[in-house]
């Protein structure tokens, strides 16, 4: 039995689970994984065996239980300071925490109207609602600003928001998956960052597991061409 247990939802759909999983995998720690199928009769009761919130993800470490993705990330950053979950530079670290918190608390239209669906083929004809587009515009600005200010000057440089892959990238990884699925118009820099995130070995591992899952949740009603109806 591993020291840690991470309770997650379906990998195809659970964006918050993805964030916590990326954070824990980045530490290099071994862990047991409990996948709870979402939207089933016993889903909440099963999750409540681990998490008092009744929601995923949830990290169990001995007698310690941590729920909420940012809290999990902070806990892991304290346990594994050499994993680089937050940038070492104070200004970059403050900025990373701010944009991670903004992702945690905001962008409800994007989450509601453009749900994550790893197995789906790109939706060519999906109309992007106006309130979702506002979220997209803000996220692109966040990515551009972080890259311009810290990307090449932090942690020795690198292709992620603060050079090296961090909790900030984990928080925005499900957004990158959405931007690869829906016909979102992005600038060149945002597209490059999206592709870097999607090509990260841990994202590739998660996506492969999502593809292999047996569970299906109807996210949209599809039209005759296989595109979601708005």
Image (cartoon, rainbow, N blue to C red):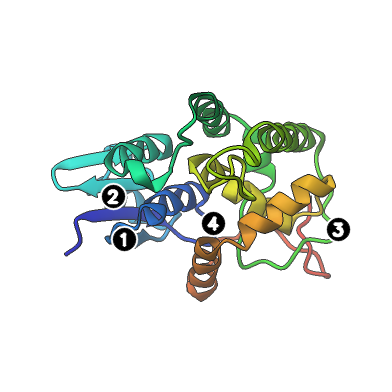
Disc nearer the start of the sequence (3/4): 4
Secondary element type, mark 4: loop
Q: Nearer the viewer, residue 18 or 13?
A: 18
> How many other residues sit within 10 Å of disc 2, few (<14), some (14-19) or many (≥20)?
few
Question: So how many labels did they put on this image?
Answer: 4
Disc nearer the start of the sequence (1/3): 1
Q: Is residue 114 above or below residue 37?
A: above
Say the numbered circle drawn on residue 34: 1
Residue labelled with disc 3: 125
Residue labelled with disc 4: 13
- Residue located 19% across and 56% down the image: 3
Instruction: Estimate the spatial distance between the alpha carbons at disc 4 and disc 2, rounded to whole Å.
Output: 19 Å
- The answer to whether the residue labelled 1 contacts the one labelled 3, judged by CB atoms less than 8 Å apart, is no
Disc nearer the start of the sequence (2/1): 1
Instruction: Estimate the spatial distance between the alpha carbons at disc 3 and disc 4, rounded to whole Å.
Output: 21 Å
Q: Is residue 95 above or below residue 41?
A: above
User: Residue 132: horizontal and vertical position, in percent?
Assistant: 74, 37
Secondary element type, mark 2: helix
- The answer to whether the residue labelled 4 contacts the one labelled 1, judged by CB atoms less than 8 Å apart, is no
């Amino acid at each position: 039995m591993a020291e840690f247990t991470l309770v997650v939802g379906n990998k195809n759909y659970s964006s918050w689970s993805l964030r916590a999983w990326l954070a824990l995998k980045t530490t290099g720690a071994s862990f047991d994984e409990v996948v709870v199928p979402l939207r089933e009769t016993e889903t909440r009761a099963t999750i409540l065996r681990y998490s008092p919130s009744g929601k995923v993800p949830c990290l169990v470490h001995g007698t310690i239980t941590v729920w909420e993705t940012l809290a999990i990330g902070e806990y892991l950053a304290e346990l594994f300071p050499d994993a680089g979950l937050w940038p070492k530079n104070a200004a970059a670290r403050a900025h990373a925490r701010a944009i991670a918190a903004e992702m945690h608390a905001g962008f409800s239209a994007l989450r509601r109207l453009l749900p994550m669906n790893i197995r789906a083929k790109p939706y060519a004809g999906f109309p992007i609602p106006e309130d979702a587009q506002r979220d997209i515009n803000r996220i692109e600005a966040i990515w551009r600003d972080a890259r311009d200010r810290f990307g090449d000057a932090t942690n020795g440089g690198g292709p992620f928001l603060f050079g090296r892959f961090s909790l900030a990238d984990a928080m925005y990884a499900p957004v990158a998956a959405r931007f690869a699925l829906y016909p979102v118009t992005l600038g060149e820099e945002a597209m490059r960052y999206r592709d870097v995130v999607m090509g990260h070995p841990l994202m590739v591992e998660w996506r492969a597991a999502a593809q292999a899952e047996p569970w299906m949740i109807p996210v949209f009603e599809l039209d005759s061409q296989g595109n979601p109806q708005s």
